[in-house]
């Protein structure tokens, strides 16, 4: 299997090489040259498989023989061993034909563990085989950093550096990152905001000459193809549990960078009968405006109570655009160029294709809090702020009530006690057993100035020989 850039100007890469990179050299994102597809009979035969066995079926065609089956199977098994629930992604019913897919049973209580536990093990395997060492550098406003650190902390051939905005992530989020004390993990609290963190990482990827001889940077944000790939699995898992391929399913997805829902789009292209994919956004609603009004224009970032969706421009949207424009890399290059002026209207044909599968909805903080309160009053089930937006979006724009609607629960409510209290909970939602001592654990991080050369020097000095 080969991987090509959405801008059409970069050489194609093998699976292993695409995992070890970030953006393509032409600025695009890598996607598979062709998608594997599964027949209805094949999908029907997966009913009842364990999450890990299903993951192998879905992932193996993308790896295309780069990794022997037995090794791939072990990478997958090890990745989901760390989850706290035997079902890995349990379904809970909250209404008529309405289901919550709990994607927060991993070590850091957010859906990013699905991809980052897997990516950590995959990198470890590839690097050992190649006798190669790499540096992981990433920026986080919260969930990505802890999931990446948990994924990479046991990898001998990786030194990982995660930048977070100093004093601007929650205590739970910071402690989840800074209490991992293995000597390949470095937390940098940057005296700046999240954009500053992200710009440092971007500049460092652009010119890697500050790294020690023979090292390269690997991206662990959702531009890394392996993250998208691992997320396709739970769409098939939930779909087959609810009757696919004999009946269709629908999904509502709390969306930020468009990585999670893009995996759902791929599942539908691969043969899962998906009737509707709902893009649920908070006040940072560029995707909702694009889908509903063809208004894909930049607006000031709003800080919301669903911080993991506080994103001004969604990077993975380019992967969808590539398909909507019939995989014409030059057309994508032109669109991106146009977007530099601030706005990017889509063609009628692209818009029509998108709307045949995607719907969208936007919810601001006050309305989101009311959803947490209402769902708890009705069912006793406590939603986190991101998931609450997805549930309300499903209730507002769902097309057919006879088709099961799966709302992806992207984080545990225990990560967001402030929202729970605002919604009338008298006590903070409990952290799971494995994290009860989080506030007693030793922390390690370094506060650094908002200065690229200082950060790069720090990374170079702390990369192990
Ligand atoms: C990352 C994240 C999202 C957004 O996912 P994307 O793939 O960026 O669209 C939503 N909810 C939570 C809790 C997250 O951590």
Image: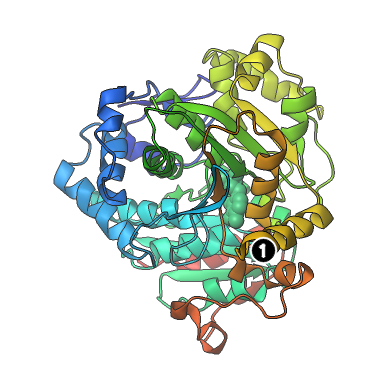
* Residue projecting furthest to the top: 349
In the figure, residue 361 lies in which quadrant?
Answer: top right
- Residue 167 position, x and y percent, is 72, 73
- The residue at the point 33 percent across, 56 percent down is 133
- Residue 7 position, x and y percent, is 55, 22
Rendered position, 188 above or below 379: below
Rendered position, 32 above or below 90: above
Q: Nearer the viewer, residue 195 or 294?
A: 294
Rendered position, 229 above or below 308: above
Q: Quadrant of the N terminus?
A: top left
Judging by the rendered image, the residue that carries numbered circle 1 is: 376
Q: Nearer the viewer, residue 338 or 362?
A: 362
In the figure, residue 284 lies in which quadrant?
Answer: top right
- Residue 73 position, x and y percent, is 21, 48
Rendered position, 72 above or below 184: above
- Residue 215 position, x and y percent, is 40, 53
Q: Quadrant of the C terminus?
A: bottom left
Q: Nearer the viewer, residue 109 or 19?
A: 109
- The residue at the point 59 percent across, 71 percent down is 414
Image-based side of 434 in relation to 368, left or right: left
Kind of element beneath mark 1: helix
């Amino acid at each position: 299997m080969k991987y090509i850039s959405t801008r059409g100007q970069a050489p194609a890469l093998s699976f292993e090489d695409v995992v070890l990179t970030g953006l393509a050299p032409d600025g695009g994102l890598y996607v598979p040259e062709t998608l594997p597809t599964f027949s209805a009979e094949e999908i029907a035969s997966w009913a009842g498989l364990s999450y890990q066995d299903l993951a192998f079926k879905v992932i193996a065609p993308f790896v295309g023989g780069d990794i022997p089956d037995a090794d791939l199977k072990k990478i997958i098994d090890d990745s989901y061993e760390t989850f706290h629930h035997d079902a890995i992604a349990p379904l809970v019913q909250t209404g008529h034909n309405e289901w919550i897919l709990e994607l927060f049973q991993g070590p850091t209580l957010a859906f990013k563990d699905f991809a980052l536990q897997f990516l950590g093990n995959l990198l470890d395997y590839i690097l050992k085989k190649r006798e190669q060492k790499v540096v992981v550098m990433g920026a986080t406003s919260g969930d990505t950093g802890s999931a990446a650190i948990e994924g990479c902390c046991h990898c001998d051939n990786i030194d990982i550096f995660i930048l977070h905005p100093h004093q601007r992530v929650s205590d739970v989020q910071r402690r989840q990152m800074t209490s991992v004390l293995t000597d390949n993990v470095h937390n940098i609290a940057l005296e700046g905001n999240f954009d500053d963190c992200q710009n440092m990482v971007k500049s460092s990827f652009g010119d890697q000459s500050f790294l020690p001889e023979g090292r390269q940077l690997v991206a662990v944000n959702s531009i890394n193809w392996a993250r998208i790939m691992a997320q396709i699995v739970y769409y098939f898992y939930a779909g087959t549990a609810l009757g696919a391929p004999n009946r269709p399913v629908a999904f509502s997805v709390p969306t930020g960078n468009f990585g999670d829902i893009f995996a759902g789009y791929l599942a539908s292209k691969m043969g899962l009968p998906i009737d509707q994919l709902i893009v649920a956004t908070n006040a940072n609603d560029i995707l909702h405006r694009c889908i509903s009004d063809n208004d894909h224009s930049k607006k000031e970032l709003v800080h919301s109570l669903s911080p993991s969706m506080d994103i001004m421009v969604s990077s993975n949207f380019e992967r969808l655009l590539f398909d909507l424009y019939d995989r014409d890399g030059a057309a994508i290059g032109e669109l991106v160029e146009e977007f530099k002026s601030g706005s990017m209207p889509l063609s009628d044909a692209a818009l029509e294709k998108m709307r045949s599968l995607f719907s969208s909805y936007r919810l601001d903080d006050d309305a989101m809090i009311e959803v947490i309160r209402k769902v708890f009053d009705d069912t006793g089930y406590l939603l986190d702020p991101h998931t609450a937006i997805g549930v309300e979006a499903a209730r507002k724009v769902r097309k057919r009530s006879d088709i099961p609607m799966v709302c992806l629960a992207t984080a545990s409510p225990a990560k967001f006690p402030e929202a729970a209290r605002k919604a009338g909970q008298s006590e903070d939602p409990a952290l799971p057993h494995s994290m009860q001592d989080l506030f007693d654990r030793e922390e390690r991080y370094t506060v650094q100035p908002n200065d690229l050369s200082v950060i790069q020097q720090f990374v170079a000095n702390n990369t192990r020989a």
